[in-house]
Image: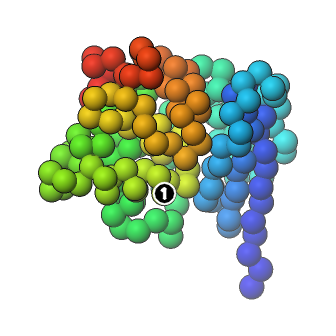
């Protein structure tokens, strides 16, 4: 039995985004080096199953509000990670949650913020599963697999008001 894997690079105004599909499902989205202005937005050919997603990502990087209509592919992540990732998908564009607030939303014990942060760090599909929308209890930008410049830029792109790398309180859910 042959398995089908395809990959592509999307050149965005913020840097390169690498996408990988396995058996027609997107399984990985990796943010390359943060290089604003270094790339024009030109996608290489996407697999047929990924054309709409690539078009949506291009619109997203132009600042458009996009409903990716994304659901997690089967077989990625632990049950706990998937639970956290599902909660991340519910955070609206232009808003942020805290790690502790997300833990409370999930009904986890009070000391579970770190576990939520670890699940965010293991997210293989940033942007689609918007872990960049999670900040510290004080609203500080902390940890992001793509790096803080990516996190800052994505939040700004989505209209989240920031001051000195801190989310203004009214933007927290």
What x and y, as percent, mark residue 52?
67, 40
Residue in the image at 41% along x and 43% along y: 89
Residue in the image at 65% along x and 34% along y: 57
What is the secondary structure assignment of the residue under circle 1?
A: loop
The furthest residue to the bottom: 1
What x and y, as percent, mark residue 131?
45, 42
Quarter that holds the C terminus: top left
Seen from the viewer's position, the closer of residues 136 and 66 is 136
Seen from the viewer's position, the closer of residues 91 and 45 is 91
Q: Determine whether 71 is above or below 60 in the image.
A: below
Image-based side of 41 in relation to 173, left or right: right
Mark 1 packing: few (<14 Cα in 10 Å), some, or many (20+)? some
Image-based side of 97 in relation to 15, left or right: left
How is the structure coloured here? rainbow
Residue in the image at 69% along x and 28% along y: 14
The furthest residue to the front: 164
Q: How many marks?
A: 1
Can I make out residue 65 in this image? no
Residue in the image at 31% along x and 53% along y: 114
Can I make out residue 54 in this image? yes
What x and y, as percent, mark residue 93?
43, 27
Which residue is the site of mark 1? 122
What x and y, as percent, mark residue 74?
50, 66
The answer to which quarter of the image holds residue 118 is bottom left
The answer to which quarter of the image holds residue 36 is top right
Quarter that holds the N terminus: bottom right
């Amino acid at each position: 039995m042959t398995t089908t894997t395809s990959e592509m690079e999307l050149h965005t105004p913020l840097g390169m985004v690498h996408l990988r599909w396995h058996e027609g499902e997107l399984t990985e989205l990796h943010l390359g080096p943060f290089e604003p202005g270094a790339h024009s937005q030109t996608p290489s050919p996407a697999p047929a199953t990924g054309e709409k997603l690539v078009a949506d990502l291009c619109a997203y990087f132009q600042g458009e509000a996009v409903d990716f209509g994304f659901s997690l592919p089967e077989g990625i992540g632990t049950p706990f990670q998937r639970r956290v990732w599902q909660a991340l998908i519910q955070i609206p564009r232009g808003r942020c949650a805290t790690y502790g607030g997300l833990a409370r939303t999930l009904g986890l014990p009070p000391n579970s913020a770190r576990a939520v942060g670890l699940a965010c760090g293991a997210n293989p599909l940033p942007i689609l599963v918007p872990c960049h929308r999670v900040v510290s209890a004080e609203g500080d930008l902390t940890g992001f697999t793509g790096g803080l410049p990516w996190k800052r830029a994505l939040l700004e792109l989505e209209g989240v008001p920031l001051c000195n790398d801190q989310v203004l309180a009214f933007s927290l859910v």
